Amino acid sequence: MKKIIKKNVFFLLSLAFFLITTMNGYAQEANLPDGTIIEKLAYIKDIKNFSSESERIKVLFEVYTESQLEASPGMATFFGKPNFNHLWDDVSPEGTKKNLAVLKIFNASKDWFNLDKLTEDDKINFSIFNRSVGDQYAMNSQFPEQYLIIDQIQGVHTYIPAIIQMMPTNSSKALENIIARLKGIPQLLQNIEITLSEGIEKGIVMPRNTVVQVPEQLKSMIAKTPIKSLFYTPFANLEGNDLLKEKVKTIISKSVNPALERFRSFMTDTYLPNTRESYGLSELPNGTAWYNQQIKFHTTTNKTAQEIHDLGLSEVARILVEMEKVKSDIGFNGDLNAFNTFLKEDPQFYFNTPEELLSAYRDICKKIDPVLPQLFGKLPRLPYGVKKVPAYSEQATTTAYYNPGSLQTGVAGYFFANTYNLKTRPKWEMEALTIHEAVPGHHLQISLAQELENVPEFRTMLNFTAFVEGWGLYSESLGPELGMYKDAYSQYGQLTYEMWRAIRLVVDTGIHAFGWTRQEAIDYFVKNSGKNENDITVEIDRYIAWPGQALAYKIGELKIKELRKKSEETLKDQFDIRLFHDVVLGSGSIPLDVLEDNVNQWITNQKGN
């Protein structure tokens, strides 16, 4: 799944690129005084202001949701909350300090409540709240995440046009919000520059290989004429509104483009010369502890880097055996390296035009959709579509990603497929990729999360990477049950994707904990994978840019598979795959230990029935 902006960029905004939320009547309207979030928290802390602990904790959850939207207007847009659509996030050093001060108080609130006076649902919600807030606070209070917000894969600069293009245009107010945001781009870019400059002064900067393409990406966002600008897209198809359109064109040519050019000059002349040639997070001050916290944050486990590295080596060896079997079944004469070369080079495995590739992805989606009720009791209402990755980011972007939609704003979810360099987009990977990014992977899971009912709103906003990406990878294993992978090459494609995630465990820890170079990581990937070198290089640069995030996929997948196996062996004939999947997805994004508790409770209930 695509994270449009780098994880933890503004420590709340990382939530925004996965889950769009609606609130379905959980909490009562709070009788809070007007004022800042900190003033409201002070009111909540005083138990005398409430008739019960349950009332007080529900108000805490309401204010927590409010604080996230206030701290990140960009996140509010992704959540379909229009009240903040005229603003950008405050990414200045002052804004970062303000957000951290608020988060500190939320973290302290874990000691405010008498758990004996809470309902069981309140206790569950409070436990998940504390886990989410605690992980965020531990990361951002100890480590300067704000300095690592720029990269060529999915950095903060790519988030700007992405948000503009997904804003609603269905009212005059909505259009004025877009204009306000366009006017605010120069200040936003200046704040980013100030923060990055502060990082340079402290020696906390990105590796050069992860940002070297950023100036060219910024250049591609500067259109020669306003009507061809990415930022003009929301106005391009509006009927009438000629005066408004002229206003937008002027803003783009006189304000947005010059700001992008200034920021491009900063990246070229100031930031790139000060980037580092090292790769691992452990090379930065307190880097080993920083990476350990990243592991905990992304996997929701206490596994060590060594444990994960060893698990990766074991998984790579296991999957290699399965790959050899499929190669043998196909009847290929030659070793696995020769087979991988054949798959990468033979023209039969590639399309000639982007349109053919996108059409084939849509056909796969149409085949899967009717089968979903056989595996899921509850399906989301939100539809989804297939689009191509935007040209400004396609060269440095991975093969595909998913962006969520919103029932509230009438925006569908979208599976974005990369059509850059078609000779690196083989047909045999397409079924597994579609399953992961669209259905029953990210679109199904994320859309169900946004439609959760009778839970506090923050629960629908959570993004525990191990759960979200673990589900995506687990979904790939459902291919045979969905009628996919009937072709042996597609079976092998699914194994290459599973291998890809197993390799991540080895190379991510190798780079950030054990001192591997970029080339050592690439060489290991090439040796054990059928993926082409362009994809491999992009992937390795992604792992360098986002320490620990890539570990979540395999860790989460293995936990879900473990829980399914336990359920099948315990319940035997009582096991219902539809009920199992509904339990796994029924609480939204949750830590893996909470998921295990949920499944164990379900098993107990099923046995009782």
Image (cartoon, grey):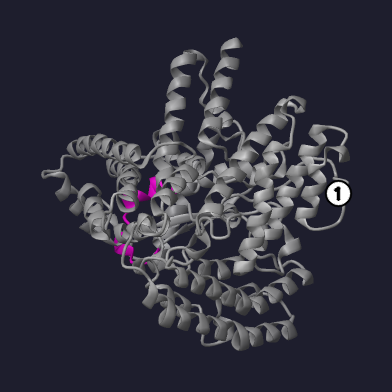
The main secondary structure of the magenta stretch is helix
Q: Is residue 385 above or below residue 205?
A: above
Residue 404 pos. (x, y %):
58, 53
Q: Nearer the viewer, residue 370 or 383?
A: 383
Residue 62 pos. (x, y %):
76, 46
- Residue 91 is left or right of residue 305, and the answer is right
Residue 287 pos. (x, y %):
40, 54
- The residue located at (41%, 66%) in the rendering is 206
Residue 334 pos. (x, y %):
11, 45
**Residue 310 can be seen in this image:** yes
Residue at label 1? 32
- The residue located at (80%, 51%) in the rendering is 40
- Residue 327 is left or right of residue 284, and the answer is left
Assign a secondary structure to mark 1. loop
Q: Which residues are magenta?
A: 419-434
In the image, is residue 353 part of the stretch drawn in magenta? no
User: Tag 1: Cα neighbours inside 10 Å, few (<14), some, or many (≥20)?
Assistant: some
